[in-house]
Structures are given as C-alpha cells and as structure tokens.
Amino acid sequence: MQRKLLVLLPLLTLFAPLFAQNFAAQWEQRASQTQAKQPAWPPPLITTYVGLIQVARTDFIRQTASNHVETWNLDGSKGLNLIPFANTEVDVNLPPYLEHSAPSAANGAGDMSFLLKYRYLSGNAEHGNYDLSAFLSSTIPTGSYKNGSLDATISPNVGFGKGFGLFDVQSTLGASLPVADTVKLGRTVVWNTAFQAHLAKYFWPEVEFNSTWYKGGPNDGKNQTFATPGLLVARKIHAGDAHSRLAVCAGAGEQIATSRFHSYNHEIAITTRLLF
C-alpha cells in the first residue's frame, strides 16, 4: 500500500495544479455566462443587490444613537459572495466587530450570517434590463456579550430591479423571523429601494430609502425609515482585457432618519469591494 502511494504521489503533484486551473477556469466561465444575462449595475450601499455577483466585500459603519452613543461596525456583516451554479449565489458573511463609545457597553463580535439567492428572471441592457430574484438569509447567534441576537433568524426576501437608460431602481422586500423567543424578539418587515444613475463612466450616485416595521418585541407597532444618499465608484482593474473579471468598487453614504421613531440617526457607511 505504501509503495502504491509513493507511485501515485508524483502523479498527484503533477496533475493537481492542472485540475485546480481547470476548475477555476470553468467556475469563471460559468459566472461570466450567468452575469452576461443580467444588467451591469453595482450593488447598492444598503439595499441587497437583486442580481448575482461574485465579490469580496467589507463595510465600515458608524451609528449614532439618540443618546449620542457612537458604535462602529467593522465589516458591516459582509464577506464573500460566490456564483457556484447558474442563476445561484451563495454568500458567507463574517461576524462584524462592534466598538462602542459608551464605557458601559462591551465591544465584541456580532452574528455570522449566510444568504442563498436564486435569480428567476433577468435580461441584460439589450434584452429588457431587469432582474427578479428571491433569496433566503439567516443569522446564527455568534455575537459576544450583547452585540448579537439571542437566537438565530431566517429572512425570506424577494428583489426586483429595472433599468431605464442611465438610471435603475432596485427594490427588496422581506421579513426577519426569529426561530425562537418570537414574543421577546419580535418580527420585522424590511423594504429597501435604491435609485441609481450612471454618470461619467465610473460614477454611480444613488439615493436609497430603507424602512423597517416592527411586530412584537420591544419596538412593537413602530416603524423607522431612512433616506440614504450615497456615491459609488466602480472600475475594472484590467480595462483593456475583455475577458478579465477583476474590478474594484468603493463608496460612501449617510443614513438620515425621516421617521419620528428611529433607533439611530446620521449613520455613516463606507464600502470597499473586489469583484472577481
């Protein structure tokens, strides 16, 4: 048996790089073919992207509560988005790190989350310029101290986007459902809509409206809405290579409360992304 392994080891060493290269090439081709059937919009700052994307993303968010306590959310519950199959996206989002200005609040990690998205209908700019998808996200209570939820949550969502020349609108509607302690934690319904424009090749100014309705829990019967103006800048790394998928995108915006009830106000959000 040991002799057989010694004979096979050089063969494995020889063919492993070829297998990995072929696997990566097939994955890249599949992702390119899938994305070619949808509009080429950048993911909004807050609203979940309604199309499919491969990206490594991290955000930096500063929230200011009504009592003037500031909280920095480092990573913004972002991570790695992949297209493993046609019309399908899988996201693995790392736990954010929460840092509070109040001495009594303990800093620590938040909850880890996952997302599974399926694109049902789409058309690129030459074929309707639209996207329709459904996605299911979930969180697990990995937060330390009081920086996360007491229980896991499941969030079914639907998203639709439509382009009109240099403009597009992307909208998602969903609910966050705790798997336990429903009376204590409550449920939420979330509706996000982003309006974007494409200017001067690289610039995407946008304004988003982010609304949450609470059912049960400490905020039962309340709702909060934010208007979020922002700017995204996106550019391919190898602009002269039509086959290259690498691109960078960065942006920033501010969530401004427009409803009487709001748990925070004037949130600053900064995003950095590597698309591949």
Image (cartoon, rainbow, N blue to C red):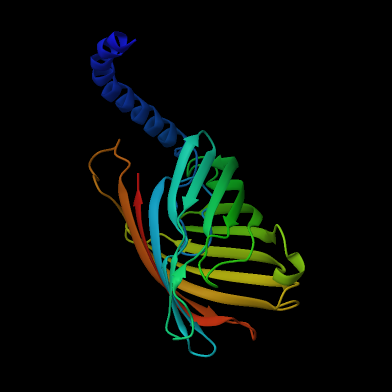
Viewport quadrant of the C terminus: top left
Q: Quadrant of residue 250?
A: bottom left
> Is residue 42 visible in the rendered structure shown here?
no
> Is residue 107 visible in the rendered structure shown here?
yes
Q: Quadrant of residue 33?
A: top left
Q: Residue at x 34, y 29 (%)?
A: 25
Viewport quadrant of the N terminus: top left
Q: Nearer the viewer, residue 147 or 58?
A: 147
Relative to residue 219, is residue 156 depicted above or below?
Answer: above
Q: Is residue 17 left or right of residue 128?
A: left
Q: Position of residue 67 (x, y in %)?
A: 53, 90
Relative to residue 113, is residue 21 depicted above or below?
Answer: above
Q: Is residue 4 left or right of residue 185?
A: left
Residue with the most extreme bottom position: 67
Q: Position of residue 42 (x, y in %)?
A: 43, 55
Q: Nearer the viewer, residue 89 or 207?
A: 89
Q: Position of residue 86 (x, y in %)?
A: 52, 33
Q: Position of residue 187 (x, y in %)?
A: 71, 66
Q: Nearer the viewer, residue 104 or 131?
A: 104
Q: Residue at x 32, y 60 (%)?
A: 200
Residue with the most extreme front position: 2
Relative to residue 127, is residue 232 depicted above or below?
Answer: below
